[in-house]
Image: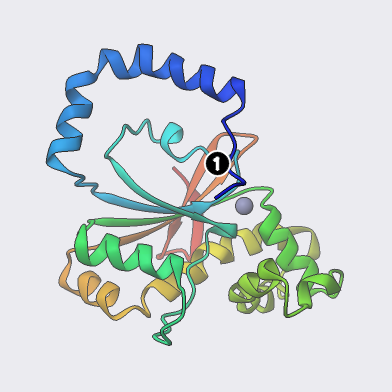
Amino acid sequence: MKYARPLPTYMVQRYQGWKATTFSENRSWYKRLAEEGQRPRAFIISCCDSRVHVTSIFGADQGEFFIHRNIANLVPPFTDDGDHHGTSAAVEYAVTALKVAHIVVLGHSNCGGVQGCYDMCSGQAPELEEKSSFVGRWMDILRPGYERVLEIPEAERKRALEKESILISLENLMSFPFVQDAVEKGDLTLHGLWTDIGEGDLHQYDPETKSFVQV
Ligand SMILES: [Zn+2]
């Protein structure tokens, strides 16, 4: 691979700082993690957005969360067509191999992926309708959510669509036979969360009221 290059200096310096402080001070903990393997209790599915700092907001350390990130924290429906399914592979490994007790779908405010879906579905982003658009075809997963938010006032639709990205992912998770099985046995619980980046607030889906309530 002739295109790989040395890291930029700022990243090398940050790494060396981490090795000399955080790592050195917790050397035995890292050694134990390496020897005993991972046993995360929770699997978090979040957006790729750099502002969503999954481990920070839960004060999590290494080994605590199994994490998968993609555009707009989406889980596609179960499809056994033999194709490349990165998100579905992460779901399968988390549930069948790691046997996590919780799956958390974490959405967020000001999501660019959700905005793209909104623009595409409302006819303002023809480039996303192209077959060649990876983002557009990925955001097709959220199209049923767009149909649902059309019932509410326009000013509230984008935020509602961010929450639909979480609900549709939870619905699609239940289409995986091994997820459904683990949930029905009581070995696995699903959680829907939405975080407001500017406020630092966290809201969770409440099935009783069918709404997101602040944690
Ligand atoms: Zn996002």
Residue type marked 1: Val
Rendered image quadrant of residue 25: top left
Rendered image quadrant of residue 94: bottom left
Percent position (x, y) of residue 194?
53, 50
- Which residue is at the far bottom? 81
Measured along the vertical axis of the image, is residue 32 above or below residue 117?
Answer: above
Percent position (x, y) of residue 79?
43, 84
Rendered image quadrant of residue 90: bottom left
Q: Residue at x 67, y 59 (%)?
A: 113
Q: Nearer the viewer, residue 52 or 70?
A: 70
Q: In the picture provided, is 106 more to the left or to the right than 150?
A: left
- Which residue is at the far front? 2
Percent position (x, y) of residue 213?
49, 51
Q: Residue at x 49, y 74 (%)?
A: 76
Mark 1 C-beta closer than 8 Å to ligand 1: yes
Which residue is tagged 1?
52
Q: Nearer the viewer, residue 34 or 61?
A: 34
Q: Secondary structure at mark 1?
A: loop
Q: Nearer the viewer, residue 201 or 16?
A: 16
Residue 109 in view here: yes
Residue 153 in view here: no
Measured along the vertical axis of the image, is residue 41 above or below residue 172?
Answer: above
Q: In the picture provided, is 95 more to the left or to the right than 67?
A: left
Q: Nearer the viewer, residue 10 or 214?
A: 10
Q: In the picture provided, is 177 more to the left or to the right than 187?
A: right
